[in-house]
Amino acid sequence: MKKIIAVALTALAVQACADNQSIAGIHAQVGAKNLKSRSDTIDVGEGTTKQFTRTPDHRQFQLETGLLKLEPVALVGCGLARVAGEVLGSILSGAWAHGADEHAPGGILDVSQPDDTYVDLGEVGAAPGTYCGLRIALVPVTAAPGEGEVDMRGHAVYLTQCDYYDSPADTAKHYCFTLKLAESAQSVVLDLPEAVTLGPDRRHLGLAVVVHYDRWMDRGADDDAFSALDGYAPIINNPPCNTADTATYDAAACRTARDDFKAGLQDNAELKARVLDNIIASLSVEIAESD
Amino acid sequence: MHTFTTRGRAPMAFAAIWIASAWPAAALACASCQCGDPTLTLMGVEKSYAGRLRFALDYSNRSEHQGTGLERQHLQEDRTVFGASYAFSENFSLALRVPLSSKSASNRTLAREEASGLGDAELTAKYTLGRSGQMTARHLWGVQAGLRLPTASEQKNDAGEPIDIDAQPGTGAWAASAGLWYGYFRFPRMLYASLSVLEPLDTGYQGLEQGTAVLGTVTGQYALTPRWSLQLGLEGRIADYNRFGGVRDDDSGGTAMFVAPGLVWAPATDWLVHVSGQLPVIRNLHGDQDERGDLRVGIAYDFSTN
C-alpha cells in the first residue's frame, strides 16, 4: 500500500511541477498592399497622392475610392493537393462569406492610399506540409459602416473613379461613376513565388497580397469598351457636350446625357464583370517574411 | 478532540467498495463537464456511520476532440483529486474534493496549449431522507447538494497571456448542484442511482458561461469475494450549450452516456483500490465533438473518529 501511495504522490508532484506554455501553430500571416505595376502610370493629384488607374491605351481614370474586402482562406498545397484544393474551392465557392472558421476575418484595403499601404488581413493556419499557393477571397461586407465610412454592405469591392476624358487638368470635362462589385464571394488561388515547406521547424510565413490597381481598367474596361457603350459618344466632346461648338452645346442636355450614361454604366453587368475579372487578375502574392 | 483510529471491518465493508462506482468524469472543453455522480467516490453509498472520515486520492486520464478541419482540437487531461469526507451522523455527511489538473489542447497546425494547477474545488452535502427494508435497511434514499468553488486561478504562459480556456485547469466560476439518490443493498449485490442538476452561477474565465447540465448515474456492483468486486455502471450527461461572451459555442453540450466497468480491490482493512474505465455508448453531442472514454484509478482510506 505504501508503494501505491508513493506512486500516486510522485505522479502528483510531476503534475504540479508541469509548466504552462503556449506553442504557436503553423500559420501564415497575410496582409495586402497596393502597388502600381506599370512604370508609366502617372500620379497626379494637386499635391496629393491620389492614384490613377490607366488603361493600356493611355486613357486615365482618377481613382477616388477603391476598397477591397479581402480574406485569406487557406494555404494551398502543391501538385495533386493543389488540384484537390482547386476542386474543393470551386465546390465551396461562397462558403467563405459566412461562418467558415479556417480563414481570417480579413480586412479592407483602400487602394486610393499611397502605394505600399499595408493592411493586415489576419492569419490562416496550416497543417505540416509543402505549399505552393494561397487561396484568397473577395468577400462581401456584412457589417454596417462606421461614421464617415463607405457603405459596402453586400459587396466586396467599392470603386469610384472619375473619367477625365479630355485631360486630367481639365476638371470641367469629366464624369465620375461608382461600381459596386462582387455580391458573392469570389476566390482565387495565387501562386507563391516558391514552394514553402512548413512544419515543426518552420511555423511562420508572412505573405503580402499585392493589388496592382492600375490594371483594373484593362481588358474589357478600356477605352474601346467605353467607346462602345450606349450614350458614351454624346458626352465626349460631341453634341450636346462639345463646348467648342456653341451651336450645339446645351449644358442641361449634356448634364442629362452624362447622368443617363453614368446610371447605365453603374448598372452595366457586363462591364462590372470585366472589371471584377481584372481586379482578380491584378492580385499576386509575395513572401514577406519567414522563419 | 478526536483520536483517529481505523476501525476494522472484516470482511471489507461491502458497501464501501462501492465508492468507485461513479467516478466523476473529468472536464475538458468545459472544466466542469462531467458524467455521473461526482460525489460517490468520496462519500460512498454505503450505510454510513457517524464519525467516519474518509480520504481519497483519485487519478483519471481522458481525451476529447472538438471542431473540424485544422481547428479540430485534441484535448487531454490528467486529473488528480484529493478528497475528504466526514459523516456527522448516519444521515448527514459532507465532502470536499480538490482537483489538480494538467490539460493540453492541440490541433493539426501543431499549436499547443498546456496548463497545470489547482482546479475548482467542490463541496458536497448528502442527506438520507429515508430507509426501509429489514434491520439492515435494504433501501436508502435521500438528497444531495453541492457547490463548486472558483478556486482555480487563470493560468498564463511565459508571456503573461492567459492559456486558452480549453486547457485551463478550472473555470473560475461558481456553480451549484442539487439532486436525489437511491441505494439498494443486498449482499453480494448493490445498486446505486442518482440524478442531479448542475447550474453555473456566474461567468468564468475568458467569458465562459457554462450551460446547465443534468448528470445521472446507475451503477451495480457484485462482490466476488470479500476483497474483490466487479462493477458496471451507466453514467450520463445532458448539457446545454456553453457560451463565450454571450455567443453560443456550437461545439459544446449535448447528450453523452457511458458504460463504466470497474474492479475494486480491498487489500487491507479500510483500504480500497479501484480501477475503472468509461466507454461511450451514446454520443449525441452538439456540433463537432468526439468524447472518448477515460481511465480511472484511485485509493481511499477510512478513519473512524468515534
Image (spheres, coloured by chain):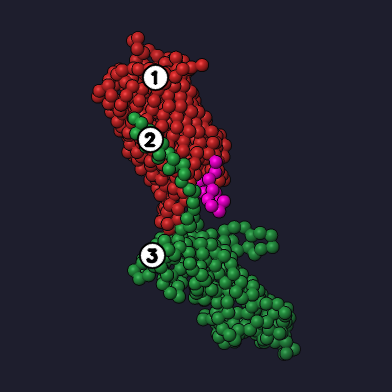
Chain colours: A green, B red
Q: Residues within 10 Å of mark 3 (few under 14, many from 20)?
A: some
Tag of residue A129: 3
The residue under label 3 is which amino acid type?
Gly
Q: CA distance from mark 2 to mark 3?
A: 44 Å
Which of discs 1 and 3 lies nearer the camera? The answer is: 1
* Res A235 quadrant in image: bottom right
Disc 1: host chain: B
The residue under label 1 is which amino acid type?
Thr
- Residue hosting label 1: B6
Disc 2: host chain: A
Tag of residue B273: none
- Residue hosting label 2: A6
Please state the extent of the stretch shown in magenta in the rendering.
Answer: B153-166
Secondary structure under the numbered disc 1 in the rendered image: loop
* Res A196 quadrant in image: bottom left
Secondary structure under the numbered disc 3 in the rendered image: strand
